[in-house]
Amino acid sequence: MNEQQSKILEKIISLDGDCLTAEICKECPFASKCLPQFLHGKQKRPSKQERLNLALDVIAQEVLLDDKSL
């Protein structure tokens, strides 16, 4: 994960998943999962809690996989 993606995930977490109001969708690693479904009405977009959980899961995986002490 690059630094920009890390910042975006941290922003999603700081906003408690309320990221659609934060103007970060164009850089979000989840945009392909969230935006097309929402914009085209094909499926329900991920909820605020689901977006928060996605960000937390990615950060947790990054920390666990990049932990050099293991």
Image (cartoon, rainbow, N blue to C red):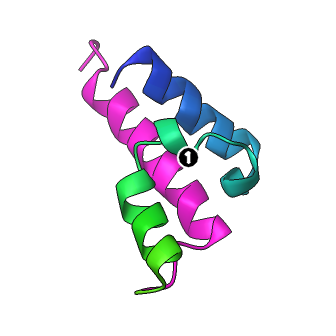
Q: Which residue appears at 36% of the width and 57% of the height?
A: 32
Q: Position of residue 1 (x, y in %)?
A: 33, 25
Q: How many marks?
A: 1
Local crowd size for mark 1, using a 10 Å CA cut-off: few (<14), some (14–19), many (≥20): some
Main secondary structure type of the part rendered in magenta:
helix
Q: Which residue appears at 31% of the width and 20% of the height?
A: 67
| Residue bounds of the magenta highlight | 43-70
Q: Is residue 52 magenta?
A: yes
Q: Position of residue 15 (x, y in %)?
A: 76, 46
> Is residue 24 or residue 66 the one in the foreground?
24
Disc 1 residue type (three-letter):
Cys
Q: Position of residue 47 (x, y in %)?
A: 60, 73
Image: 42 above or below 18? below
Q: Which residue appears at 68% of the width and 42% of the height?
A: 23
Query: Could one spot residue 17 in this view of the protein?
Result: no
Q: Mark 1 sits on what residue?
A: 25
On the rendered image, what quadrant is the C terminus found in? top left
Image: 20 above or below 46? above
Q: Which residue appears at 56% of the width and 33% of the height?
A: 8
Query: Could one spot residue 1 in this view of the protein?
Result: yes
User: In terms of secondary structure, where does tag 1 sit?
Assistant: helix
Q: Is residue 33 magenta?
A: no
Q: Which image quadrant for residue 22?
A: top right
